[in-house]
């Protein structure tokens, strides 16, 4: 909890509490490694996840809908010493922010993106998003969602992300480990967090029963198969590649 | 001396470069030059024209009628022939019905075994001979421009030069009048102004006519990071991200791209981030005419985003001023932590002029780089300006309404105080720009008011017509001299600056042009005389 704020405004039982706790633990652990808090810069988009910057004592930017990734890229380019971390919702990153998502992964921008995937727009009271399953009834799909959902890990993988992981809001210990590793990974790190929305898509039971941990894929082809299992958690794929920022800074005279 | 040369051909004939080299040829001898580039949105074919005005006095515009037409294609000849008041030089690959001076440019290039684009070098040789300029001067221009690669141009232009003098008489003898002058493109002036004011990061998505600024920064200044991201939305947000991390950054686009940036402009206003945007106008609405000139984005740029926040909008009126003003705006954006927009136009950005760039410099502002705990990034101050802080200082920026610490709030009391704080900065900005809000020339009975590149043609005629000339630089905040009535000259259909003046109680008469072409002095003499 932030030293300057006394109340957290998420619904009781919200998955965000677990995600928040895992992040704070990861930052503490990075602190023990000698990384000062001020270097871990948080950018969040619009949605319930977007309230997170208010609850931390770190440099932050609560930006507009869908634009977390270009801002992270501008930050990292301007000061490569910083560790920019983005929090984004499924609507934020994959509806309005889709173009940025693909390009950030393609560039291998050295930032970490944590996607709160609850398959619904929560803060605007329950409309469908890019990850809402086909057939699901929401406020704007009262006769069932006519679209197939996007698989965020698959998209990150085929777009060129060099670190693809999936966690679950109910497994804080694993989530902390994944966040820690994602922040330290050199290159574009993507972490999808499976999360219930207690108000509009309460999947606690579904997730609890189905999530399971897997070992990282040994090849890209394996990774393609692995990400298709919607409940597989852990680091799914990891590789090394020169980052966008390294290339641009190298080109300077 | 005052000559107006039109070099014309198809896209792909190298007409643009020929115009630039022609200006350099005369500026090498100490003359002033101005080049207007007219071209279509296509890569091959169509028609392109470079109109090169040369004078022994400073010039800021081209003229409508040509003393010399250099023509590389027959169908292009028919478009430009009505404006010829002097001679025609043409490539003998076609026959020119009005006569003229035929130079076998195609043959010369074929003989040298070079691609057809080298006919532009041949045309330069013919121009040099026509004005009896020593060939060595032209050779110097090629070498200074292309370095070692200039050899082919020199051989071809020399062949055309010799052919001209063997078969024709030189028309006039152009003597050296002074030291060599620099020929500068508007795009370069803007880029150099930004750099002088500390630019380190430039992000832009390609859009005519703003692209040359991106090309220039990427190519010439590799100590600056310039990059083309996925869209204008990404460009503006990357610029904001870099400013949040403490580095001076900018983005540039034209009206269509600016429309995409509008939500982020409001965000920079709310989060109090220094943001500089270059908006180079072209004909709108929508895609309009992509390579033609207009000044019809003023109303949009003055109010580009929802909500209320301080915003600076200013427009340079010459290439020299573009250099100064881009630096001024960068400094203002940082001083007041708010968006600033350099509103320019195709005619200024893509034209070239003999110019000396001076008067741009960085004005440093204090930046906090460390803090004990969360700091009051948005501290309520009397001036409205709070300390700017960047990570690793624990500063929290927010696009929502926020407290002094940057925490989201819906509190009526805080909202009112914060909104007042931001808007208070407008007063300071106004005081800051008061002395440079407009420029005045000549004493006359009646005032003519204009903005942007329209100044160039107007400047030439107002004095002889007995007017006083006022050029607006700062459009927001707007600083106006005492005026009861004025003739307002601008390139749009409704009179957008005129409307702004009317709202300030000035009685206006509109003098407008909206066909995609800038005014020429001849046209203005007709409508104002």
Image: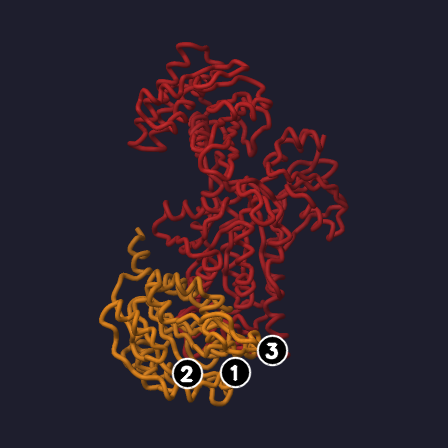
- The N terminus of chain A, quarter of image: bottom left
Tell me the SS state at disc 1. Answer: loop
Q: Quadrant of residue B28?
A: top left
- The reply to whether discs 2 and 3 touch (Cβ–Cβ < 8 Å) is no
Residue at position x 33%, y 29% from top?
B143
Q: Which chain is orange?
A: A
Colour in which the image shows chain B: red
Residue A198 % position (x, y): 49, 86
Chain letter of disc 2? A
Real-space CA distance between mark 3 and mark 1, rounded to the nearest whole angstrom: 32 Å
Could you say which is closer to the camera, residue A193 or residue B29? A193
Could you say which is closer to the camera, residue A208 or residue B51? A208
Q: Residues within 10 Å of mark 3 (few under 14, many from 20)?
A: some
Q: Which residue is mark 1?
A: A200
Q: Nearer the viewer, mark 3 or mark 1?
A: 1
Residue A35 % position (x, y): 31, 76
Q: Which residue is mark 2?
A: A20
């Amino acid at each position: 909890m932030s030293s300057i704020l006394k109340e957290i405004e998420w619904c009781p039982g919200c998955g965000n509490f677990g995600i928040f706790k895992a992040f704070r633990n990861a930052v503490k652990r990075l602190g023990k490694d000698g990384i000062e808090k001020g270097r871990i810069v948080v950018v969040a988009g619009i949605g319930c996840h977007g309230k997170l910057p208010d609850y931390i004592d770190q440099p932050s930017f609560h930006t507009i809908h869908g634009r977390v990734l270009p801002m992270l890229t501008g930050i990292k380019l301007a000061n490569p010493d910083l560790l920019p971390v983005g929090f984004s919702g499924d609507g934020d990153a994959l509806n309005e922010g889709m173009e940025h998502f693909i390009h950030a992964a393609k560039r291998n921008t050295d930032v970490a993106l944590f996607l709160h995937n609850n398959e619904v727009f929560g803060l605007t009271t329950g409309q469908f998003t890019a990850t809402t399953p086909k057939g699901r009834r929401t406020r704007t799909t009262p006769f069932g969602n006519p679209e197939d959902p996007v698989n965020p890990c698959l998209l990150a993988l085929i777009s060129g992300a060099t670190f693809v992981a999936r966690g679950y809001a109910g497994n804080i210990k694993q989530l902390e480990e994944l966040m820690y590793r994602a922040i330290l990974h050199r290159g574009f790190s993507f972490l999808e967090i499976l999360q219930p929305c207690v108000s509009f898509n309460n999947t606690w039971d579904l997730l609890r029963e189905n999530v399971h941990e897997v070992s990282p894929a040994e090849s890209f082809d394996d990774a393609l198969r692995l990400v298709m299992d919607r409940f597989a958690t852990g680091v799914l794929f990891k590789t090394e590649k020169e980052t966008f920022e390294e290339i641009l800074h190298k080109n300077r005279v | 001396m005052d000559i107006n040369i039109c070099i014309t051909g198809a896209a792909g004939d190298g007409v643009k470069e020929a115009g630039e080299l022609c200006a350099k040829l005369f500026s090498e001898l100490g003359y002033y030059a101005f080049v207007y580039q007219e071209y279509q949105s296509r890569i091959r074919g169509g028609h392109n024209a470079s109109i090169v005005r040369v004078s022994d006095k400073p010039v800021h515009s081209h003229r409508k009628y040509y003393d010399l037409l250099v023509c590389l294609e027959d169908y292009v000849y028919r478009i430009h022939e009505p404006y010829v008041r002097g001679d025609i030089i043409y490539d003998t690959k076609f026959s020119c019905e009005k006569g003229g001076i035929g130079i076998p440019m195609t043959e010369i290039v074929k003989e040298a075994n070079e691609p057809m684009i080298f006919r532009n070098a041949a045309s330069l040789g013919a121009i040099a001979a026509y004005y009896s300029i020593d060939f060595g001067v032209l050779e110097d221009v090629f070498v200074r421009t292309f370095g070692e690669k200039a050899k082919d141009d020199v051989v071809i232009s020399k062949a055309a030069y010799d052919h001209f003098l063997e078969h024709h008489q030189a028309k006039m003898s152009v003597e050296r009048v002074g030291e060599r002058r620099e020929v500068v493109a508007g795009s370069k002036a803007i880029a150099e102004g930004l750099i002088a004011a500390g630019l380190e990061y430039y992000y832009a998505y390609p859009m005519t006519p703003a692209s040359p600024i991106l090309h220039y920064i990427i190519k010439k200044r590799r100590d600056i990071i310039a990059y083309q991201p996925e869209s204008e939305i990404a460009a503006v947000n990357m610029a904001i991200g870099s400013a949040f991390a403490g580095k001076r950054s900018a983005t540039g686009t034209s009206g269509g791209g600016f429309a995409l940036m509008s939500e982020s402009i409001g965000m920079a206003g709310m989060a109090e981030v220094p943001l500089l945007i270059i908006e180079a106008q072209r004909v709108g609405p929508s895609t309009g005419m992509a390579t033609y000139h207009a000044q019809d984005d003023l109303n949009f740029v003055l109010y580009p985003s929802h909500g209320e926040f301080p915003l600076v909008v200013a427009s340079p009126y010459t290439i020299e001023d573009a250099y100064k003003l881009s630096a001024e705006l960068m400094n203002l954006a940082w001083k007041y932590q708010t968006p600033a927009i350099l509103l320019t136009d195709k005619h200024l950005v893509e034209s070239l002029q003999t110019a000396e760039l001076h008067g741009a410099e960085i004005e440093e502002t204090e930046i906090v780089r460390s803090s004990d705990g969360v700091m009051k990034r948005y501290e309520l101050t009397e001036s409205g300006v709070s300390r700017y802080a960047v990570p690793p200082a624990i500063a929290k920026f927010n696009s929502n309404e926020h407290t002094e610490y940057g925490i989201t709030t819906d509190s009526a009391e805080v909202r009112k105080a914060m909104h007042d704080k931001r808007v208070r900065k407008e007063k300071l900005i106004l005081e800051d720009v008061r002395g440079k809000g407009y420029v005045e020339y000549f004493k006359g009975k009646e005032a003519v008011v204009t903005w942007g590149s329209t100044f160039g043609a107007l400047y030439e005629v107002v004095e002889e017509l007995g007017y006083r000339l006022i050029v607006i630089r700062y459009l927001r905040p707007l600083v106006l001299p005492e005026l009861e009535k004025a003739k307002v000259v601008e390139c749009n259909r409704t009179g957008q600056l005129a409307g702004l003046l009317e709202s300030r109680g000035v009685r206006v008469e509109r003098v407008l042009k909206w066909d995609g072409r800038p005014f020429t002095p001849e046209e203005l003499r007709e409508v104002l005389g």
